[in-house]
């Protein structure tokens, strides 16, 4: 059974690795959500500013205010572009870690399946041994009765 305990240790190690990757995945999901929320905030701010600018244009807007708002919108465009890149990086990282997690889940499942098969084979061998032992006892009792 020493091989069984060594195999159990190996499964625990693989399970630990899987849990580490799971924590890394959860962290990457959290990072993605944070960056995506920031992107949304800036996009919403730009949309609101453009709407406000349209309303002011219909009422009359000075060139200075128009330039100031256009400059602000341009800066928001740069910020949005930056956050779009961050969102893509965060999404890619999240997907990469998700693939690693899937691989670890499959690996752990394989080891667990192997362990189950080994355990079943061990129980089957015990059953065969017990059957042979009981057969021998029966034969001995039959022989002893015959004498």
Image (spheres, helix red, strand yellow):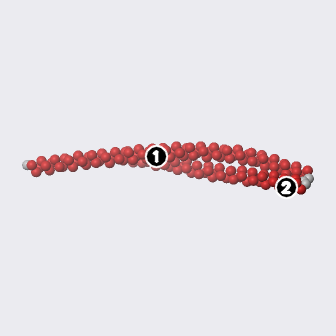
Left or right: 98 with respect to 136? right
* Marked residue nearer the N-terminal end (1 or 2): 2
Residue 46, horizontal then vertical, whole percent:
78, 51
Residue 68, horizontal then vertical, whole percent:
87, 51
Please, what secondary structure does the residue beneath circle 2 have?
helix
Label placed on residue 109: 1
The local crowd at label 2, few if under 14, some if 14 to 19, many if 20 or more residues have their Cα within 10 Å, is few
Residue occupying the point 25% across, 49% down: 130
Residue 72, horizontal then vertical, whole percent:
82, 50
Label placed on residue 55: 2
Residue occupying the point 65% across, 50% down: 32
Left or right: 113 with respect to 125? right
Q: Visible in this render: residue 10?
A: no
Residue 103, horizontal then vertical, whole percent:
52, 43
Closest to the camera, between mark 1 and mark 2, is 2
Please, what secondary structure does the residue beneath circle 1 have?
helix
């Amino acid at each position: 059974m020493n091989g069984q305990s060594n195999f159990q240790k190996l499964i625990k190690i693989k399970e630990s690795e899987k849990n580490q990757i799971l924590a890394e995945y959860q962290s990457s999901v959290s990072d993605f959500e944070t960056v995506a929320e920031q992107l949304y905030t800036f996009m919403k701010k730009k949309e609101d500013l453009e709407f406000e600018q349209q309303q002011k244009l219909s009422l009359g807007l000075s060139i200075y205010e128009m330039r100031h708002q256009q400059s602000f919108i341009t800066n928001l465009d740069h910020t949005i572009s930056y956050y779009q890149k961050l969102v893509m990086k965060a999404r890619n990282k999240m997907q990469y870690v998700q693939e690693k997690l899937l691989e670890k889940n499959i690996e752990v499942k394989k080891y667990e399946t192997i362990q189950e098969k080994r355990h079943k084979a061990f129980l089957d061998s015990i059953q065969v041994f017990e059957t042979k032992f009981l057969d021998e006892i029966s034969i001995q009792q039959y022989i002893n009765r015959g004498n």
